């Protein structure tokens, strides 16, 4: 549920904060007061397009912040995104808007626009005029039917998508693998040459690192030998000033007196250990110097081998492991080309089997859709009748499309007839803007019990309606509000009278400033706003009486529908 909205420096809004409640939240206001700005600010916070002109005059940046209560699906998504959960369970989404970088945050942590949109899909459904128009496209009809089918459809839909992907991959493989005899001969010749070049090298993983180390030592052998000889001289026993000789003399001197005091014996032991370590060092150093001795043939062999290894790495992979793997791939290619016809036949057989599985999965999916379509048709017709489509006929037609897609082979279309004696036709041929909005409301009503999204926003749901139809729409909104929090912007008193909470959007101006604000109305204020919506310029007792009568009529409906 949307708990609150905070807006700062956006268009005509200087700074405003509004708290919403459960049930039906109605928003009204004079034409031009900025009612659409409210929906626009929510849309912006959830990743909508921002333009510089949206900033309030004189402001460098704007802020929109939404606070929601969460549910298990929302908390799961937050955990998946590795974001912090708030202590009170709320979900705070904010967006700082500026001509530079826009910053999104969820519970205080910076996130991407994509993450915000993914989270928004679980929190809120914004229904505006464009969504009415989406009913003119058959793609939307399948989405609605699939949403009604719910979890039962999901498993089969995933099976269809998986089978479709496998078919497409096999088709691409057949296209890529197809070649004539000349092309096959060229592929074989190249693969044989490359494999032979790799195999003849008898590569060993890690060999290149060892060769580079040996080569580096050989190239620097003179410098290494000179410095090691000097180190050996200063640490050995042969040089007069060497550490080995000096250490031996020091040890002999200490041994002359070590028997006189136990502590001197300990010192002798320490010095003996040092003498042994130095002797070990000299032996290891002498052995290393022996290994440094090599002839030109050794140097040439290492250099040649290293050049070969590096050449193969340049051609076939950045590491020896990659070169060896490339050789194995060439062997597999040769195996395939040696029996090319059998290989292609196997691919074709796999494709035919995959197509058969796709066809079967599409059939199972289609049966689920048709089964639910019959029930949905009945429920939508009842909802449309309640919305003052007195003689409506409605049908969900499911035929077979020309091609199979990842969604199956069904072609789903909503057909309607709103006048007696007229045949069923596509919505695009029959429905007006006002009728489309009522059809969408009927759909939302039927899907309300199956939808996990807590908050619905309706903008322009009252397009092209009035009178009794407006009452029916308000009753249907109240029905939806039993299962969801509903925010609805309207200019019709019949809908506003049904409000559980009534807000007014107002615009005030001074000589150099214009501000739009939103506030919650008390009961008497709400009656005054209803009177204005009824067309009264002044709050006469007659106008207020009409407003009270509408409120009582709405209250009577609410009482019956509990």
Image (cartoon, grey):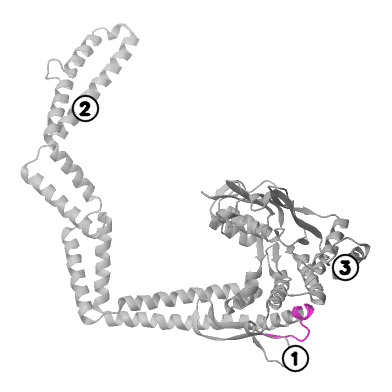
CA gap, disc 1 and disc 3: 32 Å
CA gap, disc 3 and disc 2: 104 Å
- Between circles 3 and 2, the one closer to the viewer is 3
Task: Tell me, yes or no, if residue 150 can be seen here.
Answer: no
Callout 2 environment at 10 Å: few (<14), some (14 to 19), or many (20+)? some
Q: Secondary structure at mark 1?
A: loop
Q: Are marks 2 and 1 in contact (CB under 8 Å)?
A: no
Q: Position of residue 17 (x, y in %)?
A: 72, 49
> Quick one: label 2 or label 1, which is nearer the N terminus?
2
Report which quarter residue 375 is drawn in. bottom right
Q: Position of residue 134 (x, y in %)?
A: 61, 74
Q: Which residue is mark 1?
A: 420
Instruction: Report if residue 2 lies within the magenta region.
Output: no
Q: Which residue is mark 3?
A: 550
> Quick one: label 3 or label 2, which is nearer the N terminus?
2
Q: Is residue 351 left or right of residue 366?
A: left
* Quadrant including the N terminus: bottom right
Q: Which residue is mark 2?
A: 281
Find the magenta span and give its range: 383-396
Q: Secondary structure at mark 3?
A: helix
Q: Position of residue 434 (x, y in %)?
A: 71, 76
């Amino acid at each position: 549920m949307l708990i609150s909205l905070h807006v700062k420096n956006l268009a005509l809004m200087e700074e405003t904060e509004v708290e919403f409640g459960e049930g039906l939240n109605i928003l009204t206001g004079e034409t031009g007061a900025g009612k659409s700005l409210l929906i626009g600010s929510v849309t912006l916070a959830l990743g909508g397009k921002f333009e510089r002109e949206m900033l309030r005059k004189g402001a460098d940046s704007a802020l929109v912040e939404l606070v929601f209560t969460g549910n298990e699906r929302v908390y799961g998504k937050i955990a998946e995104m590795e974001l912090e959960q708030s202590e009170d369970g709320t979900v705070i989404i904010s967006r700082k808007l500026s001509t530079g970088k826009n910053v999104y945050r969820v519970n205080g942590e910076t996130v991407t626009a994509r993450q915000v949109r993914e989270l928004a899909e679980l929190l809120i459904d914004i229904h505006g005029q464009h969504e009415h128009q989406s009913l003119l496209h058959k793609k939307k009809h399948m989405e609605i039917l699939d949403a009604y089918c719910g979890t039962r459809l999901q498993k089969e839909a995933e099976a269809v998508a998986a089978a479709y992907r496998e078919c497409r991959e096999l088709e691409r493989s057949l296209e890529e693998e197809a070649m004539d005899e000349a092309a096959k001969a060229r592929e074989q010749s190249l693969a044989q040459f490359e494999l032979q070049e790799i195999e003849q090298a008898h590569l060993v993983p890690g060999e290149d690192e060892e060769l580079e180390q040996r080569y580096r030592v050989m190239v620097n052998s003179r410098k290494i030998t000179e410095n090691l000889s000097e180190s050996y001289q200063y640490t050995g026993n042969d040089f007069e000033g060497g550490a080995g000789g000096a250490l031996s003399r020091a040890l002999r001197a200490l041994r002359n007196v070590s028997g006189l005091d136990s502590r001197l014996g300990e010192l002798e032991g320490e010095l003996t250990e040092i003498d042994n370590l130095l002797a070990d060092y000299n032996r290891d150093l002498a052995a290393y110097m022996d290994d440094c001795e090599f002839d030109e043939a050794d140097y040439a062999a290492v250099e040649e081998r290293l050049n070969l290894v590096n050449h193969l790495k340049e051609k076939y992979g950045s590491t020896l492991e990659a070169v060896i793997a490339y050789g194995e791939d060439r062997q597999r290619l040769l195996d395939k080309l040696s029996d090319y016809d059998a290989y292609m036949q196997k691919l074709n057989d796999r494709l035919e089997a995959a197509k058969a599985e796709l066809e079967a999965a599409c059939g199972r999916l289609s049966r689920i859709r048709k089964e639910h379509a019959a029930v949905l048709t009945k429920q939508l017709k009842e909802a449309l009748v309640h919305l003052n489509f007195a003689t409506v006929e409605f049908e969900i037609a499911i035929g077979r499309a020309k091609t199979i897609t990842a969604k199956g082979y069904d072609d789903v279309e909503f057909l309607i007839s709103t006048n007696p004696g007229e045949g069923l036709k596509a919505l695009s041929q029959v429905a007006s803007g006002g009728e489309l909005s009522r059809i969408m409301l009927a759909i939302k009503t039927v899907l309300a019990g199956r939808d996990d999204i807590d908050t619905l926003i309706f903008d322009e749901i009252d397009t092209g309606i009035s009178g009794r139809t407006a009452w029916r729409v308000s009753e249907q909104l109240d029905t939806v509000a039993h299962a969801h929090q509903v925010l609805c912007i309207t200019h019709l008193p019949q809908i506003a009278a049904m409000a559980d909470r009534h807000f007014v959007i107002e615009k005030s101006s001074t000589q150099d400033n214009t501000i739009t604000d939103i506030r919650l109305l008390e009961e008497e204020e709400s009656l005054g706003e209803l009177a204005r919506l009824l067309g009264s310029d002044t709050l006469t007792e007659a106008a207020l009486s009409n407003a009270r009568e509408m409120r009582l009529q709405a209250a009577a409906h609410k009482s019956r529908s509990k």
